[in-house]
Image: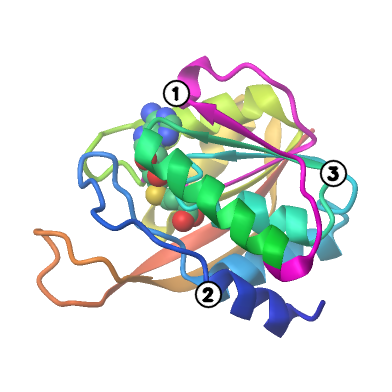
């Protein structure tokens, strides 16, 4: 599968019908998700690995990792409607690729998730509505896996780098994207608003 084919497949996934503002439900753009997953695969972090997608929403990151050859993916989300959406998307990618994937769905708060994985790949809430939730996701991720890919607001760069350093991890790669927030939420005036978002690859020292 080429990167372009991956992005096209991901662009066909179903998205939140009625996104919750409180849970900061906005799907990762398919081009950005594809770029992140392709990059992770080039680092040797996908094929044959067990992945945990925290705050999985539509499942785009965890399911995309399975499509690229991950052995297993945990999809964790507090919202049962999102879990159902991700299950529907799993059926869709299995049908499209004619493969069976090992996806494990875990409905509940990420704080109580207690499995281990090789790699966490996540686009968690940014903490706009629920202050510090981005930090909570990251702290949790560091207990789950030695390698983490995580999206956060680019403005938090110094804070994140210092936080992970305090816990014995380091930022090995960092890239930025213009993130389209497509879903119209009350506090977004324009239909498509863009924000600068960073993708961190963090690994244990
Ligand atoms: N990862 C998806 C969705 C991002 S939106 C994507 O990249 O498209 C953030 C997701 O985190 C939402 O699906 C929301 O329901 C979930 N979420 C918010 N708070 C959570 C919590 N405390 N525990 C688990 N999931 C949570």
Residue toward you, 46 or 14 = 14
SS for tag 2? Answer: helix
Expressed as whole percent of the image width and height from the top left, the position of residue 130 reads 25, 35
SS for tag 3? Answer: loop
Region in magenta: 96-125
Which residue, given by chain and number where applicable, does mark 3 sit on?
71
What distance separates the C-alpha of mark 1 from that of mark 2?
A: 26 Å
| Residue at 50%, 61% in the rendered image | 198
Tell me: residue 95, above or below residue 126. Answer: below
Q: How is the image coloured?
A: rainbow
* Label 1–label 3 contact, CB within 8 A: no
Residue toward you, 45 or 60 = 60
Expressed as whole percent of the image width and height from the top left, the position of residue 26 reads 34, 57
Would you call the spot at circle 3 few (<14 residues within 10 Å), some (14-19), or many (20 or more)? some
Which residue, given by chain and number where applicable, does mark 1 sit on?
108
Mark identifier at residue 99: none
Would you call the spot at circle 2 few (<14 residues within 10 Å), some (14-19), or many (20 or more)? some
Would you call the spot at circle 1 few (<14 residues within 10 Å), some (14-19), or many (20 or more)? some
């Amino acid at each position: 599968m080429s990167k372009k084919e991956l992005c096209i497949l991901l662009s066909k996934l179903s998205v939140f019908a009625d996104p919750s503002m409180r849970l900061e439900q906005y799907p990762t753009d398919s081009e950005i998700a594809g770029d992140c997953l392709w990059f992770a695969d080039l680092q040797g972090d996908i094929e044959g690995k067990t992945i945990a997608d925290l705050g999985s929403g539509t499942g785009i990151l965890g399911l995309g990792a399975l499509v690229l050859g991950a052995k297993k993916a945990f999809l964790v989300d507090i919202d049962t409607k999102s879990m159902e959406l991700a299950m529907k998307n799993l059926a869709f990618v299995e049908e499209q690729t004619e493969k069976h994937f090992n996806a494990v769905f875990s409905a509940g708060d990420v704080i109580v998730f207690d499995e281990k994985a090789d790699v966490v790949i996540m686009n968690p809430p940014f903490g706009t509505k629920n202050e510090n939730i981005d930090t909570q996701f990251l702290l949790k991720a560091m207990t789950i896996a030695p390698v983490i890919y995580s999206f956060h607001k680019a403005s938090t760069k110094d804070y994140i780098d210092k936080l992970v350093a305090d816990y014995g991890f380091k930022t090995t790669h960092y890239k930025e994207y213009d993130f389209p927030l497509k879903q119209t939420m009350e506090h977004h005036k324009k239909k498509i608003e863009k924000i600068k978002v960073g993708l961190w690859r963090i690994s244990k020292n």
